[in-house]
Each structure stands twice: as structure tokens, then as C-alpha cells.
Amino acid sequence: MEGFPERGKAADLGQLQSTMHSIELACTSIQMHMNSAAAEATILSLSQTPQPYQACKFILENSQVANARFQAAAAIRNAAIREWGFLSSDNKRSMISFCLCFVMQHANSPEGYVQAKVSSVAAQLLKRGWLEFSATDKEAFFYQVNQAVYGIHGVDVQFAGINFLESLVSEFSPSTSSAMGLPREFHEHCRKSLELDHLKTFYCWARDAALSVTNRIIESDSAIPEVKVCTAAFRLMLQILNWEFSTTAFADGVKQGSDSPKRSECNLVQPGPAWRDVLVTGGHIGWLLSLYGALRQKFSCEGYWLDCPIAVAARKLIVQFCSLTGTVFLSDNVQMHEHHLLELLSGIIQWIDPPDAVSKAIECGKSESEMLDGCRALLSIATVTTPSVFDQLLKSTRPYGTLTLLCVLMSEVVKNLMTNNSEEETWSWEARDILLDAWTALLVPINRSGGNALLPAEGKNATASLFALIVQAELKAASASAFKDDDSDYLQASIVALDERLSSYALIARAAIDVTIPLLTRLFTERFERLNQGRGIIDPTETLEELYSLLLITGHVIADEGEGETPLIPNAMQIHFPQNLEAENHPLVILCSSIIRFAEKCLEPEMRASVFSPRLMEAVIWFIARWSCTYLMSREENRERNSRNILLKFFGEHNQGKFVLDIIVRISLTALMSYPGEKDLQALTCFQLLNALVQQKHICVHLVALDSWRDLANAFANEKTLFLLNTAHQRSLAQTLVHSASGLRNSEASNLYVRDLMGHMATYLVEMSSKSDFKSIAQQPDIILPVSCLLERLRGAASASEPRTQKAIYELGFSVMNPVLVLLEVYKHECAVVYLILKFVVSWVDGQISYLEAQETAIVVNFCMSLLQLYSANNIGKISISLSTSLLTEAKTEKYKDLRALLQLLSSLCSKDLVDFSSDSTATHATNISQVVYFGLHIVTPLLSLDLLKYPKFCYDYFSLLSHLLEVYPETVAQLNSEAFSHVLGTLDFGLHHQDVEIVDMCLRALRVLASYHYVETSAGKVGLGSHAAGLKDPGGNFKEGILSRFLRSVLQLLLFEDYSPDLVSSAADALLPLILCEQNLYQRLGSELIERQANATLKSRLTNALQCLTSANQLSSTLDRKNYQVFRKNLNSFLIDVRGFLRTM
């Protein structure tokens, strides 16, 4: 390793041997689990020693302990990355050359992991110097690698050369690169440079390496070393094809793939036109398919071969070629892409065709890996083509299309699943998921303009047959699960868990909707009739399970999930049915009406008891909720006569809509009243069905006019059964009922409705809390339960606040202010009740604060202040160290929930200064929201602990609030007392060193605002942050730095000496610039200290110039405008790249 940097004089042999012996002993101790801590410290010291390169070289070349050589390689990497800034160019090149030479010279070593480590180190060091090495330097390295890859020095060296390229490509890829403590821009520049100048060359080297050994592999009857070379070359080629290419433009007419979720991975390959000669027109695909085919034929009798590394690697590469798309194909030559896919499909089809023979062979013991790769290939082709192109591919060589093959293959997989109805996942499970993804890729709408993926007639017929088989399989599985006593997967599978698979089934059904809707209607009718005919005679369990399954399948077929928006009728429903059908004869109307009539039967007590089990009711409620979002009283109908409007008009508000709505409400009330303890059913009813109905105002207009809705409201207010619901369900029900008030004719009627609905609940709390003996009876379960329920109901009503009901909900909250404070005091030891109180107040304040006039705002703010003070008085020091570990953990969890609620309360109060719909200003009544919030934060802060900040959600909420406060109200900082200020800034300092990048970013943004505010204010002759920025003496007479000085030190320390995400550099630059402008003298002093600590004259000069450039390069000025921030970010990036490495060694 000539030219390696040495520390002082050359180390003598005895010292090198001693170091090697220590590292060997440490590695052996770790393997033997002896004194591991000391051994790890010894190994760590090697990496942390300044310039340990000679010792590492000696260990690599002389040690007989493989782990010691591995650690020596790691130490070279760590030290070189750390010290890169002051290594000479010769030193850097020497280290890379040594690592490359070592890998090549020891290519036949049995310790492959050591070779891989050294190869990785070479790759990382080459990347670290990539932007500073000249083209000549790079070519010198790559000439050495090229000679190895071409096999000039033998098969082992060839294998080592390919592995090095694999490490190099991995390092330059953003998703697999190693951390180097450098800005993201550095990694991006490296990635672009490698892609533009070398990536294609590496691919060609790998291809040529594989070509050079394939003849020997095919001719040989035994395992030869060339096999591992070919396998490594395939792996490298696959890795390069998986590169995230910058060129992502698509050729005209080329499908860009589906954005729907997939169970199976399918990465598009989009390298651009520069790669056309290598990947498309050079015969590369034909060679690869021929090689695999020849080897497959040669080893056809060897069952193990399909899972050999070379076979697996070749198939993966072939499958990846199926994803090739974009401008690599000529935009004016569509046939080029189709020919490419046809060539691939012609080679792949033997893996999967004929499907029945392939399935039978797998069941007889053949490996399923090839068949699954064939399925993945179909998925890839489906992802980059349209259904028509996909179907035509096979027709040039077969009497049927590719869609028919896909249907037959999927059918065979489904048959296997039916035959082997095992709870353990088999090959057919995986094949089903892959093929369903292929169907999804084909059938999801091509774009969002409303067009649908249409299938040719042959494919449509095959699809209809496939869906019929799928439904048959699902019904068989449902029927088989009916009498199982064990917790089988089918019984335990929730509606949500099935959703992904059923969504794919729905796409298949919609492709032949005119056939599949009548099929579903027939299946429903048969089972309805079977229930009616067999009542009291035949056990209905199997039929009920089949109905459960049919409801889920049908719900997915006829309607899409809303995902926060009102879902439209699926396009297939609009274009596949005749436009002149009468509504009563429309297949979808017949299907939906029959299901609704069946669901209505649950209102009959006898039918409910014998037929409608809780499980079946869950499916009924889920179906109605999904269906009603799309079809019930839709506002999308118009006068055109088409299939879509026929459906919407039939279930519209002027036809059957009101009648169906009444049935739905009565079914909902039955689900809540007649199935006590069925939490899943009640959750579906409250959260999905009823909540969905009240989201649309035009439906609310009809809801509030229904007797059934009034029955629901009366039951909510008076029925004991609904008080036994889960409290979250009661909250949701209250929210739903209050939301429905939007359907009343005016604001007065809406407010009256809310008062009538919720008023007696508030009265109960007032009367209960006013009782003279309340404290003595409050802990009784029959008191705690109604109190908890009423708080949840009040919270639900408060969260439903909107302008037309705001007055009533304000009055509701105002009436229980004092009772809430009484409850907080009485139940201070009941964590659950305290939490409910806090969450109610949070919801109420959040919904009201923006609408309140000044006087009302003052009342609410004072109430919140009283609440905060009371909570603080009851909770400071509540967690005792004498508690057991389990109780301590529980106490911390409860406190976390409470304090998070308080933070949300403070955030709600803050929103008043951002969004205010009141007619006057709060300033007229001297209500200063910012001071109140800061005071509230002062109350909350003593309750905080570092342990509580370990809860991610709480931590995020806290720093989000803190950042918001400092950004919106920087002027109030100077008004805070020193104790409150130190609390706030102490947590800000903690957040600055948090492991969560987002939290550090929020703290940096807050620092930017604080420093900017102080700089702008003082520049205008004002005090800014006053004594907080200037510093002061503590009670002991010691001078304490101001906050800006403290944070200037902290930010510089973070940037220069600590580990952090490259994503933070821009935010740190924005904070650092105003800090430097505010504390220029301190910055100069800190810079001088850094320079003086540097003993090396060259590095001292380099650091001096870098510090000078940081604050003067690129015409940086002393203003805080957008342009100046951008200039400083650029300067800081250059500064860190230049000096951070050698500064961290000081």
C-alpha cells in the first residue's frame, strides 16, 4: 500500500504485530461470547485511531483470522471517510488501488464475506472522491476492473471484478448508498454522473462476461467455476436494470403502469433511447432466452436445477426485461415494443403452459419457482401494455389470445386452491396474488378521464368464466368454514383484510359486467329461496356463510370505496348495459333491490333470531354503507337517458330513495339495539353507515324528516341499551345526529334540534356535579359510567360543530364549564375520566374558537386557564419512583395521553389568531391569545419529561406546537419570565438533537424565526429579544449566554461534528444565517478557535479560506431575503463538503 498516509514515523513490525494480535483476540472473544464489551471497544479503537491505514494494511495482508481482516477493512473505510478532507490525492488513489488489488489477488479466498467487504470499501472510497477525481483517474481504476471482468486474469478474478461493480452500483444508487455525512446534493451529483458516463458501459461489461462463459457452461456436464461468473453477471445486469433512471419520459401510446396497490413487486425499467442498441436492437433478449432454454432442456431431468442460482438469476433478468418501457422504444414504431414483448412471451410461455400440466407437475414435486416467475412476467407485461395489445401478443403464435391464457392459468390456480383448501399458504396462494395484480394492472382505468379498459369478445367471455369459477371457489371456502371449530383464516379474516383481493375480483367481474351481475343475482336468489324453503328444517349455517361471502363480493363489484370522496358509479356499469332499459328491468337494479329486500327482513324478530347472525349483519351493514355512498339519492343524475341515470334516478330522492333511506335507518337502529356487545357490528353501523349518510346535506334534509330518524334520536337520548355501547361508538353516534341538523331549514331550527338532543345530558351533568354528596358517591361504578358516556357524547357533539349549529354547541359547552372543573377535581385519580374531560374540552374549543366574539373568547380562554391550572396542581409529581415498573409504565402512558390532549388544546387556542370569523377583535377585551398559550405551555412544561418525549405522537405534537408558537408569536418571547423561557428553550435544545428528522427540522425553523426577528428588530433600533438574547447573570453571579449565542454554538456543533440527515442541511443553513448576523463577534471567535485547534498548516489555511467563503462567497449580503438564503445554502453545502471530514478528526 505504497503512498498510504502514515502518522509520524513508519510503525515498526513489532507494533504492527501487536495491533494485529489485539484485533484477532478481540474478534475471537466476540465469536466465543467472552468479554464482548472490551473486545468491541478494542475493535472500535482501530476505526477511531487517526490514520490507522498501515496497521489495517498489515492485518489484511498477514492475519489468518478472517474476522480480523473484515474489521481492518471496515476501519480503513471509517477512517478514510472521516479524514478524507486532509488526505492527499495520492493517498486517496492509493487506498482505492490497494483495495482493488487485494480483492483481485485474493479472488480465490474461501472467506467471501471479507472479499465483499473490501470490495465495498473500494466502492465507497471511489464514490467519496468521485467529484474530485479526474476522468483519467477514474479510467485508471476502471481499466483494472475491466481487465478483471473480461476474464484476462482467470475466472476467480472475473467473478471478483463483477462483484466490485455490483458494490459500486449499489453505492451510487440512492436507495442503497452508505451514509457519508454529506449533503444529498453530493449523492445526487454522483448518481447522475455514473448513470450518464458509466452505467451502460458496466452493463455491457457484465453482458460480455456472461457471453464469454456461456459456451463452456452449456458444454459442461458438471459444475464449473464459470457458472458463478455468469450468475454474478446476471445479478449485475438485473441491478442495473433496477436503477432509478433519470429519463422517465414515455413513448406515445405506451401505458405508464397502474398506480393501484400491488401485492407483488413490479419495477418499470425506463432507461431512455441511449440504451436502445444494447437492450432492444442488439439481439440481447434472444441470446438470454436461448441460454436459459438450452440449460433448461439440458437439465430437464434434474429437478433441483430450476432453483439453482444461475437459473433463478436468469429468470429474474428475463422477467425484468418484460418491464422495459418508455423512450428506449421508438415513439413512431409501436411494433418495436410489441415485438420485444412477443419475443419474451414466446420464451416464457413454456414455463406456464399448458397450465393444467404445469400445476400437476408442481403437485408431483416439481419446483414452483419457474411457474411463479412466469406469472410475474405476465404481471410485468400487463403493467406496460393495454388490454388489447396484451391480448394480441399471443395470437400471432397461438389460436387464442394472451387474455385467454391468463384466464386459464388463473382458473387452474383457483382450482388448486379449491382442491387444497389448506390454511397454510401454498404456491397457489402466491400465484393467485401475482395474477390478481396482473388483472389489476390490465383493468384499472387507463387514465382518470373516465375511459375504461375494454376487452375483446374472446377475452371477455374467458373473463366471465373465470369470475364464475372465483365465486364458486369463494362460496366453497365459505361453506366449508361454516362448521369449523378452530379459528380458521377464513372465519378470522375481516372485511378490511379481504378488501384487497375482493377489489381485484371486482375488476375481473366488471370486465364482463353484463354477464357477472345476472350471475350474482341468480346466486343470491338461490340462497334466499334456500333459506325460505328450509326454515326450521335445514341448518342454514352454510347458506348464511355463502351469503356473507356474496355480499362482500357484490359490494366490491358494484361500488368503489370512497376514500374521502363520494365515489362515482363504476364506468363498467354505465357502458356495458343497454341505454333503453326500463329501471325495473335493469340487472343492477334487480340485484340491489333483492339485497335490500333481504336486508329488510332483519326487522322481523323471528327472521332476525333465525337468520341474521351478528356476522351476517356485519356484511349487510357494510354492503349498505358502500352501496349508499354511490347510488342512494345521488346528486349526479341528469336528464340524459343512459344506464347511469337509470340507476341514479331509480334510487333518487323523487323515486325509491326516501323509501330505501327509511329502511336503512331502521336497519341501523336494529343493529344497535338488538345486538348488544357486538362491537364490530356497532362500529360498522356508527362509523361507516350512519356517518356516511350525514356527510351529504341533501340526504340530511330527508333524514331529519323521517320518523325512523326521530326514533334513533329518541333511543340515543333515552334508551339504556345505547348507554351500554362502546364509548367511542356513542361519541360517533352523537356526532352523526348533530351533523344531521344541517338538513333542517335554517340555523334557528338546527340550534333548537341540537338543544333538544343534547340539552338534558348537559343538565344531568350540572345537577350531578352540584349534589352536596357528589364527592362521596362519585367513585361508584353506576356514577362513573353515565358520567363517562355523557362526556363522550358531549365530545361527539362538539366535534360536529359547524356554523349553523355553533351557537347551540357553544351554549352546551358553556353550561358545563363549572361541572367540568368539578369533575376534573373529583376524578383527579381516575385517569380515564380525566382524559375524557380533556378530550371534550379540546373538541369543544377547537370547534368554537374561530367563531367566538371577543367577550365569548375571553370566557373560553379563562376557562381553559382554570382547567390548565387545576390539572397542573393535581398532576405535578404524580408519577412516583416508588411505583412498580408496570404501574410506572401505565402512569407514564396515561400522562402522555393527557398532556397530548393539553397540547392539542393549546394548538386550538392558537388557531384563533390565524382563523377568526368573529365580527370584532379580541384585542378590544385585552385577550392576548399568545400570552395565554405561552402561559399554558409554562404550566404544562413542568409535567414534561424526557421519557414522555419518547412517545412519537406526543413528541411530534409538542414540537409542532412549539415551532408554531415561535414562528407566529416571536415578539412575545421577550415578555416571558426567565423560568418559563428556560423551560421552552430547554425543550427546543432537546429537539435540536432528536433522532426524528422532522422534529429537528421544526426546531431549526423556529430558531430561524427567532434569530430573524431579533436581527430585524435590532436593525430597526428596537430591543428584539432583549435580555434573553443579551445574556444575564444567574443568582450565583455567573454570566449565562443569551439564547442566540447558545444556539449558534449548538447549530455549528451539529453541522460540523455530529451525525445528521443530509435533508437537514437547508433548514440548518436558514437558521444559521440569521444566527451569524445576530452574533457576528461570537461567530468570528468560534471560527478562530477552530482554526487555532488545527495543527496542520495546510488544513489550517484551508479552514480559514472555507470560513471566509461561507460568509462572503457568491455575493452573500447581510439581508434576510429569499435570494440571500439560497446563496447561503449553497455556501454551506460547499463548506461542509470541504471541511467537515477533517474537522471531525480533531
Image (cartoon, rainbow, N blue to C red):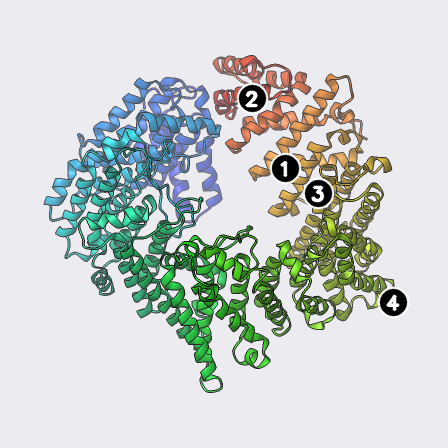
Q: Residue 39, image x and y in percent?
A: 45, 41
Quote the CA–CA distance across marks 2 and 1: 25 Å
Circle 2 crowding by C-alpha within 10 Å: few under 14, some 14–19, many from 20: some
Tell me, yes or no, whether the two marked residues, 1 and 4, touch with CB atoms within 8 Å.
Answer: no
Q: Residue at x 61, y 24 (%)?
A: 1072
Please say whether residue 889 is visible from this viewpoint: yes
Q: How many marks?
A: 4
Q: Which residue is mark 3?
A: 907
Earlier-in-chain disc, 3 versus 4: 4
Q: Which mark is residue 991?
A: 1
- Cα–Cα span, label 4 and label 2: 67 Å
Spatial separation of the CA atoms under disc 1 and disc 3: 18 Å
Q: Label 2: which residue?
A: 1126
Amino acid residing under circle 3: Ser
Residue 677, horizontal then vertical, whole percent = 61, 71
Decide which of tag 2 and tag 1 comes sooner along the chain: 1
Give the label, 4 or 2, closer to the camera.
Answer: 2
State the image coordinates of residue 701 (x, y, percent, origin top left): 66, 58
Three-letter residue code for mark 1? Gly
Residue under the image location 75 percent in, 17 percent down? 1020
Q: Quadrant of the N terminus?
A: top left
Please indicate whether residue 636 sits to the left or right of residue 99 in the image. right
The residue wearing badge 4 is 773
